[in-house]
Image (cartoon, grey):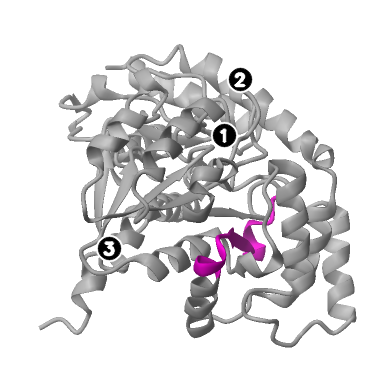
């Protein structure tokens, strides 16, 4: 008889970490593996942010912070949301957490009852469905494809809503597809949700600044759903602060208070030194981060040109984030060098073992016909990885 709870047994391990760990093991064994698995900027944290952390240590910010974060940080977040997104949130509507992942889980815990439904457009970030399971909910998937740039329509959303629907959860810009919703598309979605006041929107906007194809729009900017929306963001992607673990939610007052209550019993306040450094980061002009965005843009174009020459890959040009999500249906059902390819997870493992390139299969993203490559890597590694994949697949 298992001592592990049924709820935990229903969860899967993150496929992103499964593949990255497998790549590390192979590297440790002396195999030259190029890993394009993790969504982590390969830049160092800007110096002024690091200096703010040193200052915080010297100023003895080593004690508990308020559960939702220092007031000065929540004020800085409030000012950022107004400056960049034209969103009005008071500090009391903001909860700072141990990464955006906790911010999402706070909201889900606050609004979900057992058996409630969460609508997930596919592809979705790997943890979304597992989080829904963790809070006793049920995911309802809306299928998209490369032909629609992996975006749902308002009509699809309306058809997926039932009396049990409690949440719409999505990311824009999207991990893993690299797509983002335009203002017009979001307004149509907002109009649907506004007709269903029991639904909370969780809008994951962590890739907001890594955008090459237009202006970022938050669905919370549409007044008809402001009281139904939780905006999620954080420091990891734009500021290369992945290990600092600072995320935040901006919500209507009723939901912000509920998130504070959840977090107060889970972890309390986030790391105090990282919070103080985040104040400096958020007060930076976004133009100071453009060197990273320009480099990602350049790498995107490089990989797109190389990927077009790989047989069996159908790929669109992603307009944001730092991922490619090609459709590899051509290979599903085939036998490659003794490996039966039943889905994209099998294909990703085949590439790791035969081309020494690590990526992530799309099964855990809700798209078993696609694979995800992160191009948050050096140009040298990206060129070599695409060369290895092409050379490997040309044999078949």
Look at the image and give the residue range highlighted in magenta.
Answer: 239-256
Label located before the other in sequence (1 or 3): 3
How crowded is the residue under tag 1: few (<14 C-alpha within 10 Å), some, or many (20+)? many
Q: Quadrant of the C terminus?
A: top left
Q: For mark 1, what is the residue? A: 375
The Cα atoms of the two marked residues, 3 and 2, are separated by 38 Å
The Cα atoms of the two marked residues, 1 and 3, are separated by 30 Å
Q: Is residue 1 above or below residue 135?
A: below
SS under mark 1: loop
Residue at figure coordinates x 56%, y 60% from the top left: 251
Report x, y in % for residue 314.
Answer: 37, 17
Residue at figure coordinates x 47%, y 28% from the top left: 185
Query: Decide: marks 1, 2 in contact (CB < 8 A)?
Result: yes
Q: For mark 3, what is the residue? A: 133
Residue at figure coordinates x 22%, y 69% from the top left: 9
Report x, y in % for residue 124.
Answer: 38, 43
Report x, y in % for residue 290.
Answer: 78, 35
The picture quadrant where one finds residue 10 is bottom left
How crowded is the residue under tag 2: few (<14 C-alpha within 10 Å), some, or many (20+)? some
Query: Decide: marks 3, 2 in contact (CB < 8 A)?
Result: no
Furthest residue toward left: 1
Report x, y in % for residue 214.
Answer: 64, 24
The picture quadrant where one finds residue 200 is bottom left
Q: Is residue 234 left or right of residue 141?
A: right
Q: Quadrant of the N terminus?
A: bottom left
Furthest residue toward top: 309
Q: Is residue 262 visible?
A: yes
Q: Is residue 225 above or below residue 10?
A: above
- What is the number of callouts on the image? 3
SS under mark 3: helix
Q: For mark 2, what is the residue? A: 302
């Amino acid at each position: 008889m298992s001592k592990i709870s049924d709820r935990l047994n229903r969860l899967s391990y993150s496929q992103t970490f499964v593949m990255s760990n497998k790549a590390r093991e192979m590297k440790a064994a002396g195999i030259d593996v190029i890993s394009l698995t993790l969504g982590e900027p390969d830049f160092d944290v800007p110096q002024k942010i690091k200096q703010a952390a040193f200052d915080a240590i010297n100023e003895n910010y080593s004690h508990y912070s308020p559960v939702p974060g220092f007031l000065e940080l929540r004020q800085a977040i409030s000012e950022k949301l107004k400056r960049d997104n034209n969103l009005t949130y008071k500090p009391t509507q903001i909860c700072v957490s141990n990464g955006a992942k906790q911010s999402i889980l706070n909201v889900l815990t606050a609004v979900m009852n057992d058996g409630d439904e969460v609508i997930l457009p596919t592809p979705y970030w790997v943890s979304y469905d597992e989080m829904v399971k963790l809070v006793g909910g049920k995911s309802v998937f809306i299928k998209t494809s490369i032909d629609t740039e992996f975006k749902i329509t308002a009509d699809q959303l309306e058809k997926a809503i039932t009396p049990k629907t409690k949440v719409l959860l999505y990311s824009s810009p999207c991990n893993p597809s690299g797509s983002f919703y335009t203002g017009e598309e979001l307004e149509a979605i907002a109009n649907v949700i506004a007709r269903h006041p029991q639904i909370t929107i969780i809008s994951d906007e962590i890739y907001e600044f890594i955008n090459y194809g237009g202006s970022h729009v938050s669905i919370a900017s549409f007044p008809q759903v402001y009281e139904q929306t939780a905006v999620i963001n954080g420091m990891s992607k734009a500021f290369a602060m992945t290990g600092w673990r600072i995320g935040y939610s901006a919500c209507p007052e009723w939901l912000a208070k509920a998130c504070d209550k959840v977090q107060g019993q889970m972890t309390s306040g986030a790391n105090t030194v990282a919070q103080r450094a985040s104040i400096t980061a958020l007060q930076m002009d976004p133009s100071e981060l453009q060197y990273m965005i320009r480099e990602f843009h350049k790498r995107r174009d490089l990989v797109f040109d190389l990927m077009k020459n790989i047989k069996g890959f159908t790929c669109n040009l992603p307009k944001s984030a730092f991922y490619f999500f090609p459709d590899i249906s051509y290979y599903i059902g085939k036998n490659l060098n003794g490996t039966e390819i039943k889905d994209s997870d099998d294909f990703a493992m085949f590439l790791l073992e035969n081309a020494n390139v690590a990526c992530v299969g799309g099964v855990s993203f809700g798209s078993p016909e696609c694979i995800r490559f992160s191009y948050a890597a050096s140009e040298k590694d990206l060129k070599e990885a695409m060369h290895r994949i092409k050379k490997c697949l040309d044999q078949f």
